[in-house]
Image (spheres, rainbow, N blue to C red):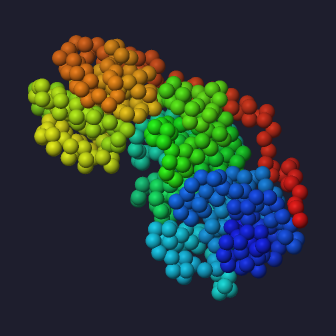
Amino acid sequence: MVVLHVTNELEPLKRIGQLAKWVRENVDGGKVLLLGFEGRRNLDGIEVVGGGLSPRVAVSDVVEEAFMELFTTLAELPYKLDPRNVSLVEGHEWRGGLAAYIIAKRLRVPFRFSIYTREEERGGQGLVSEAIKSIESFLMSSADEVFERLKNSRFRRESSSGFQQYSNGGFSILHASWEYPPHMVGGLGRAVTSMTKRLTSYADVFVATIGLPGRVHDERAERLKVMRVDPFSLRSTGLVSWVYAFNALIVAKVLTEGVKPSIIHAHDWLTAPAAVALKHLLRAPLVVTIHATEYGRSRGNISTSMQQQIHYWEWRLTYEAWRVFVCSNSMRGEVEAAFKLPRDKVIVLPNGIDLEEFDAFKPEHGERDNYALPWEKIVFFTGRHVYDKGVDLLIECARILLQRRSDVKFVISGDGPMRMHLEWLARSYGLGDKVLFTGRLPDNVLYKVMKLADVIVIPSRYEPFGIVALEAMAAAKPVVATQIGGLAELVKEGETGVLVPPESPEALAVSIERLLDNPELAKDMGLKGRKRVEELYGWGKIVRYLFHIYGRVLEEYASSGWKTLFDSSISPPQLKH
């Protein structure tokens, strides 16, 4: 039996604390995967393989550092470790345990978790300590064997691998997305949902995503399987470590389920670590859709450790991908500039809309009364209440317009961190019942309200595509939008709507008033918008083209000669003594 020991310390090669000595004393054979170490060594007959050095990206704490180390290792492992004859993977302490847990799933062998001291015994406190405790607890409950080395105490659970056999039959696609129903935040989730459902006409489709509390279960419908993980299984120290944690769980989930896709399609940085790791662990080509970038959101100011890590994973995802999809020509320019991508790698693939589903929702008699008085005209906004969406500009626009006329009702749908501030702003301007905050509306209600509106406004400061503009045109409503990003491409000035300069509440007010005073013009713009959507933005056409690109990528993959050490025909590099 060959044991693969996984550790981030080993005497004399890498020492941070006492763990290096303890591990050296307890490793008497087999192989060692040394995390955060570069190269290969022969240590008294023991093969030591370095897991690779983490990128030089600022992190906030040891938990973020450990996850960076983990994902670096998972991507490099298939080119450094010969897995033949490995029959057990043993992780030493929580950092080694994280990597060992996933590696054991890839190799289909038992996982042993070796503990020397627990975080509770070390007296740690605070968010970092609580996160480490939760990782230790998770690994103890997941291991086939727990070995408390200093106490010489072992606990074994009955062998039950729970592994599904790797699927090798037929063409299959794995989509990795942090948004998928019922967990929906913005346009990304809608795009992935429509895309994956349409793709089932061509292939078996798997979706790896996160669930909501109490709603973490897998779903299968014909050729679509949705695999969910609980994003709160592990405690985090902040947004970035939370994302890293559920990405690690996604990798483990996909490996456990035996999914071996023909191609992997990732969406944004929030599933980048998992997608990159799975690309190499499963030797499957990767494509990616970049829906937005930190470079764009921050206007090029990448300064904090969180921004640096997000930017790194966006770059890494586009670097690893065989093709990079973006939703607009504006985004194409953005990703080429942000990540120094060659133009031939980037493909514009717009988001679409399912008109059949959209048209099924019709306002009921009297439903308009829930939002406005009969003589009031409805100006509607929907979106996240964040700075980039410019909702504060709309409130300022409402103040300007309502000083000139009283027959307007601003209905604002959505939610987000700025909501309380926006409600305060409306009250401070004395707008009273002329501005209605509805909160987040389910799609079946949202689409009805859009059809009740007179004008739909999108005052964004940053908008890679603008799915709301597409929905507004599908509802045959005129759009007033800022002339930025994807909005400037979606909305045809003077034809399907009006484009105004960004950061200009006065321009918004003038354009809205023009449409309210010219109902025939507004109707004509709405009808032209509907026609444009029908001609260009149906998901059927978009997904046919996407599947064509998948085919081109797979042709390149087939002729690439790409192999890893997990393919038994490849010999490992020579060791250094």
Q: Nearer the viewer, residue 364 or 20?
A: 20
Q: Residue at x 65, y 49 (%)?
A: 278
Q: Residue at x 42, y 54 (%)?
A: 212
Q: Position of residue 37 (x, y in %)?
A: 73, 61
Q: Nearer the viewer, residue 388 or 523?
A: 388
Q: Is residue 52 left or right of residue 540?
A: right
Instruction: Please state the total of marks drawn on the protein image.
Output: 0
Q: Position of residue 136 (x, y in %)?
A: 56, 72
Q: Nearer the viewer, residue 340 or 224?
A: 340
Name above or below for residue 478 compared with residue 28.
above
Name above or below for residue 416 compared with residue 135.
above
Figure quadrant of the N terminus: bottom right
Name above or below for residue 495 compared with residue 243.
above
Figure quadrant of the C terminus: bottom right
For this orientation, the residue located farthest to the bottom is 151
Looking at the image, can residue 541 be seen?
A: yes
Q: Residue at x 51, y 34 (%)?
A: 195
Q: Residue at x 27, y 38 (%)?
A: 392
Q: Position of residue 156 (x, y in %)?
A: 65, 77
Q: Nearer the viewer, residue 315 or 451?
A: 315
Q: Position of residue 92 (x, y in %)?
A: 67, 72
Looking at the image, can residue 154 be seen?
A: no
